[in-house]
Image (cartoon, rainbow, N blue to C red):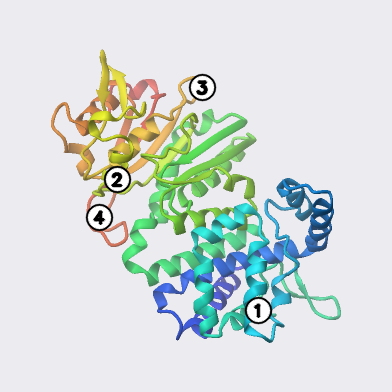
Amino acid sequence: MSDNNLNWIANFIWGIADDVLRDVYVRGKYRDVILPMTVIRRLDALLEPTKQAVLDTKKMLDAAGITNQDAALRQSARQAFYNASPFLLRDLRARAKAQQLKADFEAYLDGFSPNVQEILTKFKFRNQIPTLMDADVLGSLIEKFLDYSINLSPLPLLNTDGTERLPALDNHTMGTIFEELIRRSNEENNEEAGEHFTPRDAVSLMADLIFLPIADQIESGTYLVYDGTCGTGGMVTVAEERLGQLAREHGKEVSIHLFGQEVNAETYAITKADLLLKGEGEQAENFYYGSTLSQDGFPTREFDFMLSNPPYGKSWKTDLERLGGKGDIRDPRFVIEHAGEADYNLITRSSDGQLMFLVNLLSKMKHHTPLGSRIAEVHNGSSLFTGDAGQGESNIRRWIIENDWLEAIIALPLNMFYNTGIATYIWVLTNRKPAQRRGKV
């Protein structure tokens, strides 16, 4: 699909907000409705061809008294998700009575599979229904998303004579459109944009720093990619594309599995939704909601490649308390054995946890594979110098350098990140330094 068509669809969807929500929400809140409704409409279009099969399976399972229906309903839907309600979205727009529309729309939402329920819950989308009902715009909103001048379906839209009126929308293009909507909504919420968004140039550079030095060593096989502060999943997605491209150029076949953890509920919902929309529903199961420092979603996992842009200058006091307080932390990621010390402490001041996120990545390195692990993480300048000898920050730097894991530190241009002019740096680490780099940074 051309960029023009892609932009036209994104403009159309964002235009729905101006048409329907203008007097109901302030502009910065359009996203609360537009993002989840875009997800719902796309999933609805994907499920339409198998709707009857899902209803038949549901009826059969209910009659047999089978309560664990998830796998069978997914199979009938031929997707990683399903909707077992009797409705499609287009069944709802004919509702004349507002209360009937509300009841049926809620029944429709309740019919989605647990993985979609989690997305809707994290988006807090059900909280919007009373507002939409009070303003009498829910019906108009559904109508707009079903407009025949736009096609959000994976099948082409046909004229009555069977000719194609609008092309099909594949998963990748749908993902691109969704990401464009996220970008626009971030601009409307300018104060938050930098918190959830790493510039594409920085992400591409990080992917190149991880993969290009070992591109000729990539073998056919399975690789795991992880981001402990994954935001909307942009870093692991770019890494997946770059690794896949390099593997193809070297004649290798690779299977890439993405993993991530995110503490912000809405951002987590966007990540999971984006993966479902791109047809990567199985991958969506590898993303964990919660704080990486105090609720590690992958305590036993090790990863081949890791990229992160953790929060800097941000207090992690709540996590510190959850972990037991500074004197009582026993998490094996943060209190280790090193240089003859049985309780070598990697716990930083509670006012800035950025180096703790790096320690989390280092704890997940593979030590028994030819490539080991490669890491790229963004930090501000304080990671280079804060903390006196024997304090957590200094201990982390000492631990990294004495293990000879630090390959390079690269200064990025000022003003590269949204809403901040502070100096930022990419740290590149590996436990498989090439001979010519050993003992050097």
Q: Which residue is mark 4?
A: 414
- As drawn, the label of residue 369 is 3
Q: In screen coordinates, is 158 left or right of 30? A: right
> Element under label 3?
loop
**Residue 411 visible (yes or no):** yes
The residue at 41%/40% (across/down) is 295
Please give the residue where the numbered disc 2 appears in the rendered image.
318
Question: Viewer-nearest of labels 3 and 4?
Answer: 3
The local secondary structure at tag 1 comes to helix
Q: Nearer the viewer, mark 2 or mark 3?
A: 2
Could you tell me how far apart the alpha carbons at marks 3 and 4 are, in whole angstroms? Answer: 37 Å
Q: Earlier in the sequence, mark 2 or mark 3?
A: 2
Q: Amino acid at mark 1?
A: Leu
| Corner quadrant of residue 7 | bottom right
Mark positioned earlier in the residue sequence (1 or 3): 1
252 left or right of 238? right
Q: Which mark is on residue 101?
A: 1
